[in-house]
Amino acid sequence: MNILTMTEKLLRVIVDGDNSEKPSDLKLQKLFEEAGKVLGGNLLKNLSFFVSHMDNSENRCKFGCDYRNKLAHWTDIHIDNVNNVLVGELLFVFESVFNSVLLKYEYPVRV
């Protein structure tokens, strides 16, 4: 769960800057939209898939892993599901976001 918390905190720093006096109250979907300007479309789709679930209202089906809510509220998840594969997926998400931010701000493309 700490990996997801750090990922969300990193997204909030991207959107709000390092403003610890007034934390962001953006909902997750709005946070994704704002952070998408830095992360790019493909990474944003991966992040949305692992962290939340998307509702396809035409087919009335939900898809996505929704790990954030499952781990935070410990619902719809069994202890057997918390394994190396889950940790690997969450580290992949965090590392992808971190690397994107690092490349965007630390090594900007010079035109």
Image (spheres, grey):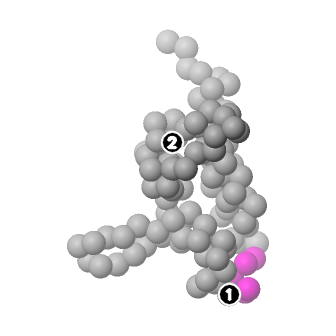
Q: In the rendered structure, does residue 18 fall within the stretch colored magenta?
A: no
Q: Residue 73 location, x and y as percent? A: 64, 77
For the N terminus, the quadrant is: bottom right
Dot 1 surroundings within 10 Å: few (below 14), some, or many (20 or more)?
Answer: few
Q: Is residue 83 left or right of residue 107?
A: right
Amino acid type indicated by mark 2: Ala
Calculate the distance from the C-alpha at mark 2 to the C-alpha at mark 1: 31 Å
Disc 2 target residue:
35
Q: Residue at x 43, y 46 (%)?
A: 33
* Residue 100 vs residue 16, the one in the foreground: 16
The answer to whether residue 25 of the structure is visible from this angle is: yes
Q: Main secondary structure of the magenta part?
A: helix
* Residue 75 vs residue 90, the one in the foreground: 75
Rendering quarter of residue 77 = bottom right
In the image, residue 12 sits, relative to residue 69, either above or below, namely above
Provide the secondary structure element on which disc 2 rests: helix
Q: Residue at x 63, y 26 (%)?
A: 105
Disc 1 target residue:
78
Amino acid type indicated by mark 1: His
Label 2 vs 1, first from the N-terminus: 2
Which range is magenta? 79-83
Rendering quarter of residue 61 = bottom left
Provide the secondary structure element on which disc 1 rests: loop
The answer to whether residue 94 of the structure is visible from this angle is: no
Q: Residue 38 location, x and y as percent? A: 51, 35
Q: Is residue 99 left or right of residue 58?
A: right
